[in-house]
Image (cartoon, rainbow, N blue to C red):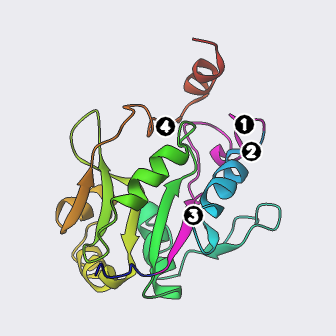
Amino acid sequence: MKATNPKLFGLILAGGYSKRMGHDKALLEFHGKPQVEFIHELLQQYCAGVFLSKRADQKPYKGLPFINDDPAFAGQGPLGGILSTMKEYPGCGWLVVACDLPLINNEALQVLIDGRVSAKTATAFISTYDGLPEPLCAIWEGQAYGAILRLFKEGLRCPRKVLIQSDICLLKQNDPHWLDNINTPQEYEGFKKPS
């Protein structure tokens, strides 16, 4: 008999400053609506609840549920958002998705969920570009909070480096572009053009 996985919640990483883009990437439209709304709707299909990870000084997005960065992790990038969430809601799994992934879809999320190994720190895709773990579309397990926090206290701030140093489950992407992200106005314009 297979052990049941801890409950899964969704977390949209939307707390960055979008410096290269020049304005909030969470509000870019790829699917006829702001990306943050698109990802929220996508995650709702798989998760018991979906939250936005944001800075304390950011305004909420149209009433979507959110988790502010904990003061202990403020200004520490995506890893700070993940740790803040795990601290506030311990013990569950978090399907974490960055707000700047225009090609993320149901198939990608289903592959992650089907491949989930909750006894590990995380279940993540292998990057199609460098073969390393992709931390910003992954399932992070709440039971690993202590181990992740220890790495954070040792000076690690990069979520990818945390995964590299952790016991994780790695999955192949069916589509090499699922996790392509958009960081600049040029990339955004290029994405919108028909291929």
Res 76 label: none
Residue at the disc numbered 2: 34
Left or right for 54, reference 5: right
- Mark 3 or mark 2, which has the lower sequence index? 2
**Residue span colored magenta:** 7-32
Q: Does residue 10 appear in the picture of this structure?
A: yes
**Residues under labels 3 and 1: Cα distance?**
22 Å
Res 46 label: 3
**Residues under labels 4 and 3: Cα distance?**
22 Å
**Residue 125: percent from the left, percent from the top?**
32, 49
Q: Nearer the viewer, residue 136 or 187?
A: 136
User: Which quarter of the rendering shows the C terminus?
Assistant: top right
Is residue 15 magenta-colored?
yes
**Residue 38: percent from the left, percent from the top?**
69, 48
- Mark 4 or mark 3, which has the lower sequence index? 3
Q: Residue at image x 60%, y 59%?
A: 43
Left or right for 160, reference 101: left
- Mark 1 or mark 2, which has the lower sequence index? 1
**Residues under labels 1 and 2: Cα distance?**
5 Å
The answer to whether the residues at label 1 and label 2 have Cβ atoms under 8 Å apart is yes
Look at label 3 and name its amino acid.
Tyr
Q: Please identify the quarter of the rendering in which residue 20 is found.
A: top right
